[in-house]
Image (spheres, rainbow, N blue to C red):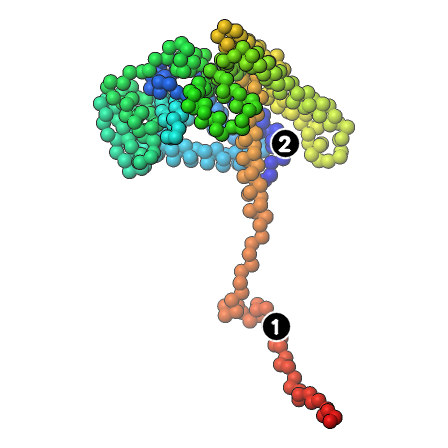
Amino acid sequence: MSLGIIEVITLLLGMAGFGLANNPKPATPDQALRYAIADPDLVAHVDAASLIPGNYKLLGQLADQPQIRSSPELQKLVREVVGEIEGARGIARFATGLDVTADITDATAFVQLAPPAEPSFVVAVHGKLGQANLEKIASTVGASPTRIDAGWFVSLGTGQPALGLTRDGVMLVGSPALVRDRLADGWRPPSHAAGTSLGYAADAIGERPVFAVVATLSQTARGEVLKNLPSGGLAADLVTRHKLAALSVFHNGVGWTWIDSTKAGLDAMELVSSGAVDLLRAAQIAPRGVAKIALGALDSYRGTSAQVDDLIQHKADLMKVVDAYTGDGNFKVAIDRNPKTLRLGVRATGKTAGEVVPFGLVAPLAVIGYLTERADAAAAKAAKPTRPTAVDPERTPPAARPPAAPAAKPPSARPPATRPPTRP
């Protein structure tokens, strides 16, 4: 089958429940930063419990949604794709002992740029993790865990990251020396006092985001980043000027924080932020307005094509899709500007994250694109002509053999032409 407009509408309606959940017990800053690098250039935190379990459950139920069940071919295709994802999940579980959809609650990554050497990094993963998981992972590369005080360490090879399991059940992935240090009995969590790199990360994680990234580049890191940027321009200016740049996505919105090194820079970022909020509002209202205009004009084209007539019959469903994936742009915005500290904080909040940032369509459209590709590939395979089999004259009955081509006639033998004698 190939996905037509009706199948796309059906899928969008079926996936309307996907989104970000509110985790009532997220990791605290102390928990997330316990195994941090003292002065990281970048910190990234993801609350997997808010993102994965609920959406994965909905994905497993997608084929049984009433809208999708009404199309047997579409339901079959969805079941096949979900089955492939379940297969990959099973392989990962066999190799690691982990159910990636339920056993990981959150992860925090810390990166420190130190050119010309490779970046140093540590990723701390919380969840239902134990020694058995570490041993399974180690066995896939032919390694064995070794004991470091109360923790366990696995070397994945020269030039490769290492794994570690701390005494409190946190899985570490990162530069071998950093992982070793954090397994020792003498390890002490670095400070995350206010005004430090980890202090800014603690502020971001304390707001309970689903995802957050915090950049506090050192001078060395700035120099390395600037090498890869065109001289001058906004990007280079932001890298040079910032003291803090943080972006967070919440279950009900988005926010960002900026600390500048000049008052003029703070004024410029406030203007940029105001424009970004205007664009977020427009991104909600404009698609809704375009959809209403298009739906209102459809009746004028009735009878011009079967596709248009199908759309007219499903106008109510189309409006449900528009309502499910766009908002009215009336989300709340709080802007906190502090001219003394040159700090700007922006928080946009709605009932859901999709009412603020129009990424509610990203996952459904990705699924639709994948299903379309699968459907087209299957259709092309079905339409591909089969190669004719060669005829074996020894095994083919004489009556079924193709007639033999007539033998070519040999050239007639003619005497060679003779030239008349030339006159002297």
Amino acid type shown at disc 2: Ile
Determine the residue positioned at 43% across, 24% down: 221
Is 272 rendered above or below residue 82? above
Quadrant housing the C terminus: bottom right
Determine the residue positioned at 70% across, 28% down: 312
Q: Decide: marks 1, 2 in contact (CB < 8 A)?
A: no
User: Would you say 302 lies left or right of 206 here?
Assistant: right
* Label 1, label 2: how far apart the Cα atoms are: 55 Å
Amino acid type shown at disc 1: Ala
x then y, percent, for residue 64: 52, 28
Determine the residue positioned at 67% across, 27% down: 314
Of residue 29 and residue 41, the one placed in the foreground of this image is: 41
- Which residue sits furthest bottom? 424
x then y, percent, for residue 99: 38, 28
Determine the residue positioned at 65% across, 25% down: 318
Q: Secondary structure at mark 2?
A: helix
Mark 2 crowdedness (10 Å alpha carbons): few <14, some 14-19, many ≥20: some
User: Would you say 62 lies left or right of 187 here?
Assistant: right
Q: Secondary structure at mark 1?
A: loop
Write down the quadrant of residue 217 in the picture. Answer: top left
Quadrant housing the N terminus: top right
Question: Which residue was labeled with disc 2?
Answer: 6
Residue 405 bears which disc, if any?
1
Question: Can see residue 25?
Answer: no
